[in-house]
Image (tube, helix red, strand yellow):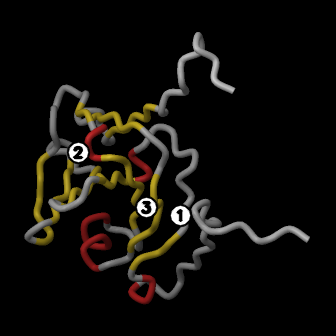
């Protein structure tokens, strides 16, 4: 039933930031494709065994902090990574041909709904890291009996 005096639900606004809060941002929507990546670029950029990436529509990204946009580094001809020029925090990844922006999961202030459902380059992960992935909410539900 549609109630004419009730506004439709708004997409959730999420905020994120670097460690020093010089670069801050907002994205809007439901987290898309939260996944870990253990490719060689991510391991070197992060200094860790994997990075948690979470997608949001690129058009919803707004830089809100005093530093404006992050400093950009191209890891591929069509892929740029954004990081804070002051503290070095790795914040975002943007592919030229995508309508999504990937934010680092732990730069988000609210990480609800960002449990990883996939792991890219899993074969390149360190052997001592064991990952249990969350169920993918987009996957089909089993038939009830």
Specify few, some or many for label 3: CA neighbours under 10 Å numbering under 14, 14-19, or 20 or more: many
Q: Is residue 77 left or right of residue 27?
A: left
Q: Position of residue 85 (x, y in %)?
A: 14, 45
Q: Position of residue 134 (x, y in %)?
A: 63, 65
Classify 65 as above or below 132. above
Q: Which mark is residue 52?
A: 3
Do the residues under discs 1 and 3 have CB atoms within 8 angstroms? yes
Q: Earlier in the sequence, mark 1 or mark 2?
A: 2
Q: Residue at x 19, y 51 (%)?
A: 82
Question: Which element is circle 1 on?
Answer: loop
How far apart are labels 2 and 3 at the CA level?
A: 19 Å
Q: Residue at x 25, y 66 (%)?
A: 45
Answer with the quarter of the image where residue 142 lies. Answer: bottom right
Residue beneath disc 1: 116
Q: Residue at x 23, y 45 (%)?
A: 87
Question: Which element is circle 3 on?
Answer: strand
Specify few, some or many for label 2: CA neighbours under 10 Å numbering under 14, 14-19, or 20 or more: few
Residue farthest along the right direction in this orientation: 145
Q: Which mark is residue 39?
A: none
Q: Position of residue 96 (x, y in %)?
A: 15, 60
Q: Residue at x 47, y 75 (%)?
A: 119
Question: Which element is circle 2 on?
Answer: loop
How far apart are labels 1 and 3 at the CA level?
A: 7 Å
Residue beneath disc 2: 87
Location of the N terminus by quadrant is: top right
Q: Nearer the viewer, residue 42 or 33?
A: 33
Residue farthest along the left direction in this orientation: 77
């Amino acid at each position: 039933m549609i109630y004419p005096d009730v506004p439709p639900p708004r997409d959730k606004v999420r905020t994120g930031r670097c460690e020093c809060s010089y670069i801050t941002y907002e994205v809007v929507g439901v987290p898309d494709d939260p996944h870990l990546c253990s490719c060689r670029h991510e391991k070197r950029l992060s200094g860790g065994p994997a990075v948690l990436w979470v997608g949001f529509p690129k058009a919803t990204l707004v830089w809100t902090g005093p530093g404006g946009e992050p400093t950009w580094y191209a890891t591929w001809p069509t892929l740029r990574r954004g990081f804070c020029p002051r503290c070095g925090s790795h914040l975002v990844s943007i592919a030229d041909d995508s309508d999504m922006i990937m934010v680092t999961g732990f730069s988000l202030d609210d990480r609800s709904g960002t449990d990883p459902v996939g792991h890219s380059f899993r074969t390149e992960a360190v052997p001592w890291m064991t990952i249990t992935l969350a169920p993918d909410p987009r996957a089909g539900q089993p038939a009830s009996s």
